Image (tube, rainbow, N blue to C red):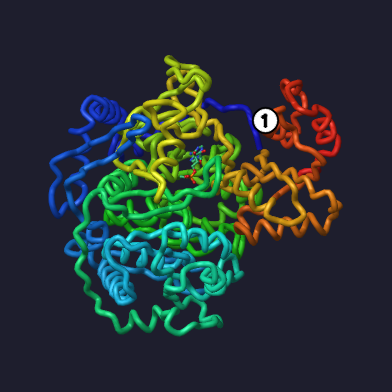
Amino acid sequence: MTQERDSTTYAPSAETVARAHVTAAQYDEMYAASMQDPEGFWAKQAERIDWIKPFSQVKDVNYDFGNVSIKWFADGSLNVAANCIDRHLATRGDQPAIIWEPDDPQDAAQHITYSELHGSVCRMANVLQSMGVGKGDRVVIYLPMIPEAAYAMLACARIGAIHSIVFAGFSPDALAARINGCDAKVIITADEAPRGGRKTPLKSNADAALLHTKDTVKCLVVKRTGGQTTWIDGRDHDYNALAAEASDSFEPAEMNAEDPLFILYTSGSTGQPKGVVHTTGGYLTYAAMTHEITFDYHDGDIYWCTADVGWVTGHSYIVYGPLANGATTLMFEGVPTYPDAGRFWEVCAKHKVNQFYTAPTAIRALMGQGPEWVEKHDLSDLRTLGTVGEPINPEAWNWYNDVVGKGKCPIVDTWWQTETGGHLMTPLPGAHATKPGAAMKPFFGIAPVVLDPQTGVEIEGNGVEGVLCIKDSWPGQMRTVWGDHERFEKTYFSDYKGYYFTGDGCRRDEDGDYWITGRVDDVINVSGHRMGTAEVESALVAHAAVAEAAVVGYPHEIKGQGIYCYVTLMNDREPSDELMKELRTWVRTEIGPIASPDVIQWAPGLPKTRSGKIMRRILRKIAENDFGSLGDTSTLADPSVVDDLIENRANKG
Ligand code: WTA
């Protein structure tokens, strides 16, 4: 998958430039303004949002380690659901807010208008309220990609409750940890989640999770397939029955700009996933602005982001950004290859999609199936293509550009993170040339800096590489780690004082354009899903046969990175194929299928320093099949373990 960097530049067409919200000259002017007068700039941008009480302060930020505090529009008040729904009713009540495309193409798509969305969200809010959910309470959402997922998010926002979505691919254990982590009052789930023709038993996963939570947690169950579920009276509530009886009006709560809107658990380099907290006013302003400008969204366009609402991309770019802009957003329940490898393009043609946003891993998988799957479908409505989640290799970029975009659609390679709330670097369709695999330019208000990883000093000039930090805050930035502000400061503000540390490496090329080179910490990116190697390790060592485990990423054709596990067994256990299989299943149960190890190598010993620290650099090199550059192994307690690992290196799965 790795390829030489391709610095060919593609300028936007005259047509793209003519249509664009932002041209090159406007970008330069607006970017300069956002740097010179951030307060003035963001005060103006916040006018995108309807405020109940206008703010008088714009920015109140302290990046000093020990005192980190981030506030935007702090004395303003608003309601996110009112911004995403109510304010559009007068002008676009009958316009589709959501187009829902089910897993099975034989089933009918749904077009949900803004008026219908209003009714459904209010009913869901009333149901949640009747279950005891109020302002500030936490609600876990564990749903398939169905409209009810959006209703649930917006119903929480309407009440002022804080949602925490758990991706439906996570296991009961992972779900329980997240319910307990935020002390949720209610979990919303469905009977089953159809995906790619198969069904995940969400309700029974929830049942299993609820064995490990407080007894008081209630469960609201949406009917999706009508599949059999067990039912506990008093705890379980039938959404469809309750919603049918509920009122379709619900007064939106007045929320402070800095009240939390949602928590989203994400993986870091150490320990268990942390609850990233996003708040109300700044997040919505940033999601709305980036959605409109990055994709060059115009009124009446049909926009499709293929992500799942279980990830931040689904929060900002399926639900909040598009709906705040009064857009039509497509929600897809299925997968790119079901019933065949033409599904994405069939859906694009069927719904006349104008902006299409997906992950490099999907592009690589579809590229492997051949261009005929794309060529069958009429993609003439496509105008902007986007990618997100991991670096895109030039080969996949070129295929996306040529085969899908026919050389006419600018590709926005959007670099950002769960923590950032929205895009931080991306080319803008009508303003910038693109280069295959480059994130190109900072968004407005974003001051990226490249630091020397050792000294932490800013590296000036072009043609340089280092770690990527951001100098100052932007409204969409996360505010804290749920329940652990200290961890927030330590993770993002302690290594490089005075900056937000992204965890990514980056290069600024000769032209001053930015390229993300990948994580510099122990986070890996598997099919665009972010995974902490520490999480997989702790799942492995929880198995009785495992004495020690070290997990690293390695290049994988389709997934971008695969999960490579070195496992040391207990003295009394022998390696076997059965045990290998058992460990794979074990990790799937502990975390979920997305964490399934690609390779397990039995390791009689792990390379450690004399102080007992595992030398991951060496393990990464071995996993990458790169034995020539192992570096200095003389500081190892026992250098011979490296020879053994090389000799017995597992065949890549
Ligand atoms: C990586 C997803 C290269 C990066 C929105 C980041 C990318 C992590 C890109 C965040 C991109 C995301 N090019 N790398 N366009 N987009 N990444 O929190 O390593 O799931 O730190 O957010 O994905 O992943 P997360």
Q: Could you say where residue 421 lies in the image, as x and y percent from the top left?
A: 37, 45
Asked whether 428 or 391 is in front, the reply is 391
Please give the name of the residue rendered at 45% of the width and 44% of the height, measured from the top-left corner: 386
Instruction: Identify the residue at horizontal 66%, vertical 37% (top origin).
Output: 1
Answer whether residue 343 is visible to the viewer in this image: yes
Disc 1 packing (10 Å; few <14; some 14–19; many ≥20):
few
Name which quarter of the figure residue 619 lies in.
Answer: top right
Q: Position of residue 36 (x, y in %)?
A: 23, 24
Q: Secondary structure at mark 1?
A: helix
Residue 505 vs 136, above or below: the answer is above
Q: Quadrant of residue 579?
A: bottom right
Where 440 falls versus 313 (above or below)? Answer: above
Q: Where is mark 1, residue-wise? A: 617
Q: Residue furthest top?
A: 461
Is the shortest distance between ligand 1 and the CB of mark 1 under 8 Å?
A: no
Q: Position of residue 208 (x, y in %)?
A: 57, 71
Q: Quadrant of residue 326?
A: bottom left
Q: Is residue 474 above or below residue 328?
A: above
Residue at image location 58% in from the left, 40% down from the top = 396
Residue situated in front as seen by the camera: 569 or 384:
569
Q: Is residue 372 left or right of residue 36?
A: right
